[in-house]
Image (tube, rainbow, N blue to C red):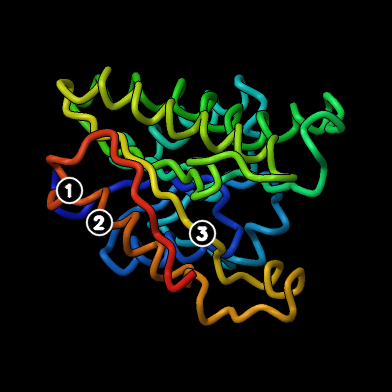
């Protein structure tokens, strides 16, 4: 695998972190498969056409749709060298015993279900081409249960365990699987939700994107199953 992955698939590509990750890889000349649930959001974030870019509106909870999207990416670019699982979701405020089953399942679906459907489609492709890189976005909150965040913490903890299991399964096939564990990311929604906080202590999307980019590079070829905290000054 080259120092700069030639084709990178990014889920959640229309979000703040997804855009930063796309920019980091684009700066290296990578071809981009940009996946998000909203056609409108993708068009707004990535206007115009580019031979280096394929934008796909996909419901990542629809396994058949994910498989079709990956097949389309393979047809366009020939393969996928790196997969960045950025898509996910956050919720808090309810004790575990008072969290309704649908709310609990929503955190599992957004953070775990999306990841599983994506790797089910991409890993066989990477196996066939002889290698690849996968970076999952977990969270610092997945390391330890926190009050009023049980559903979210459990979902992100599952992402970490899945990362470790996949790394053990795939490392000898030339596929590196790792995760990043950010604290609060400096995004417009987080600033709006916490107006009194100091965003200078949070993690800038570009800084987190640089870590993800590193984990997809040849410099990280000896790293397997890492859960890397990226916490800024928080």
Residue 63 seen: yes
Q: CA distance from mark 2 to mark 1?
A: 6 Å
10 Å crowding of disc 1: few (<14), some (14-19), many (20+):
some
Residue underneath mark 3:
183
Q: Is residue 210 left or right of residue 182?
A: left
Residue underneath mark 2:
214
| Label 1 SS | helix
**At 55% from the left edge and 65% from the top edge, which residue is drawn?**
185
The spot of residue 173 in percent (x, y) is 18, 21
10 Å crowding of disc 3: few (<14), some (14-19), many (20+):
some
Residue 77 seen: no
Q: CB under 8 Å between callouts 2 and 1?
A: yes
Q: Return the residue nearer the eye: 64 or 150.
A: 150
Tell us which disc is closer to us: 3 or 2.
Answer: 3
The spot of residue 67 in percent (x, y) is 52, 23
Q: CA distance from mark 3 to mark 2?
A: 18 Å
Residue underneath mark 1:
220
Q: Return the residue nearer the eye: 159 or 60.
A: 159
Q: CA distance from mark 3 to mark 1?
A: 22 Å
Q: Return the residue nearer the eye: 93 or 82.
A: 93
**At 62% from the left edge and 33% from the top edge, which residue is drawn?**
60
User: In terms of sequence position, does the residue under pointer 2 or pointer 1 come before the other?
Assistant: 2
Tell us which disc is closer to us: 3 or 1.
Answer: 3
Q: CB under 8 Å between callouts 3 and 2?
A: no
User: In terms of sequence position, does the residue under pointer 3 or pointer 1 come before the other?
Assistant: 3
């Amino acid at each position: 695998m080259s120092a700069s992955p030639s084709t990178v698939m990014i889920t959640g590509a229309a979000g703040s972190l997804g855009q930063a990750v796309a920019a980091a890889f684009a700066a290296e000349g990578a071809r981009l498969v940009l996946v998000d649930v909203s056609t409108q959001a993708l068009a707004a974030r990535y206007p115009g056409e580019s031979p280096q870019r394929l934008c796909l509106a996909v419901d990542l909870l629809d396994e058949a749709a994910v498989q079709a999207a990956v097949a389309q990416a393979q047809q366009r670019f020939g393969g996928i060298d790196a997969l960045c699982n950025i898509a996910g979701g956050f919720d808090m405020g309810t004790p575990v015993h008072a969290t309704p089953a649908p709310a609990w399942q929503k955190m599992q679906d957004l953070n775990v279900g999306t990841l599983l459907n994506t790797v089910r489609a991409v890993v066989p492709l990477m196996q066939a081409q002889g290698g690849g890189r996968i970076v999952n976005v977990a969270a610092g909150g997945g390391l330890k249960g926190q009050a009023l965040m049980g559903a979210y913490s459990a979902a992100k903890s599952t992402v970490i365990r899945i990362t470790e299991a996949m790394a053990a399964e795939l490392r000898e096939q030339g596929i590196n699987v790792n995760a990043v564990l950010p604290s609060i990311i400096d995004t417009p929604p987080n600033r709006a939700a916490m107006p009194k906080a100091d965003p200078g202590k949070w993690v800038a999307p570009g800084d987190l994107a640089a870590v993800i980019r590193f984990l997809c590079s040849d410099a990280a070829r000896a790293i397997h199953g890492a859960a890397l905290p990226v916490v800024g000054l928080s």
